[in-house]
Amino acid sequence: MPIGFAFHSRQQAPELLQRLSGVRNRCVQQVVRDEAALGRLPHRLQPGFHVKVQYLPSADGDVIEVLGHRFEVIDVPGHTAGHIAYLQRDEDRAPLLFCGDTLFSAGCGRLFEGTPAQMHQSLARLAALPHDTRVCCTHEYTLSNLRFATAVEPGNPAVRGHAERCQALRAAGQPTLPSSIGLELEINPFLRCGQPEVIAAARSQGAAGEDPVSVFTALREWKNRCR
């Protein structure tokens, strides 16, 4: 993640990320309890094993302060049951979103614990943020995601144009991130489940209906099959 582009100081970025990584959604504790009750807890987390890491349970809407920066906690279940995102709103800069594995540029995370409906709702929450919000996701999957977005919407000029820009960036050894919410609304098929071409593509892949959750479900299953 090219955090140096998001903050005033590149030197500050590693410590900021380390501290943010210590904040865990309260759901994580419940997931561990549930998995243990079902006998599905990994060996490394069986009774007697202790994770030696400090963490701060948090809830949707909480505000934390890290190195002088205030972040709002946003619950975004889907990729995992306890997935959260962090949003910073500065008066003099565009908002900054750390969205983990929920939203990628031109894509979204796989569903490991959540449901399609949960993930769609989480993405809708992020999509409703101001268009200039800078999107810092966890992985540089942009080119792969854009190939999929092109398959979904071959007639979308924004996808084609951004793919060309990103290919040039990667060829020069540069990151494609951060993205922005405004850009993602133009190129990300998972945020465009109401667009006619996206609906048609999803129906061709077996979508159960034309409602956004059915379209999203078909797109996510289709993406799972793509490499």
Image: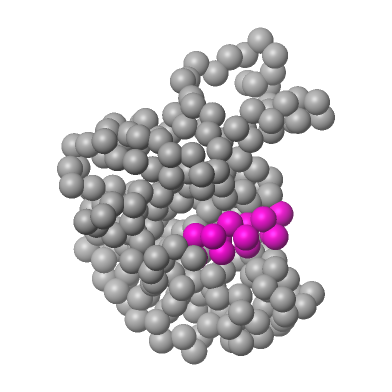
The answer to whether 203 appears left or right of 69 in the picture is right
User: Is 4 within the magenta?
Assistant: no
The answer to whether 222 appears left or right of 59 in the picture is right
The answer to whether 2 appears left or right of 54 in the picture is left
Residue at coordinates 68% horizontally, 49% vertically from top-left?
114
Coordinates of residue 8 in the picture (x, y in percent): 18, 47
Q: Quadrant of residue 158?
A: bottom left
Coordinates of residue 157 in the picture (x, y in percent): 41, 86
The one of 83 and 72 positioned closer to us in this rendering: 72
The one of 99 and 66 positioned closer to us in this rendering: 66
> Can the viewer see residue 207 in this picture?
yes
- Which secondary structure is most common in the magenta stretch? helix
Residue at coordinates 69% horizontally, 18% vertically from top-left?
46
Q: Which residues are magenta?
A: 115-127
Image quadrant containing the C terminus = bottom right
User: Is 122 within the magenta?
Assistant: yes
Residue 211 to residue 78: above or below = below
Colour mapping = one colour
The one of 87 and 13 positioned closer to us in this rendering: 87
Q: Quadrant of residue 152?
A: bottom right
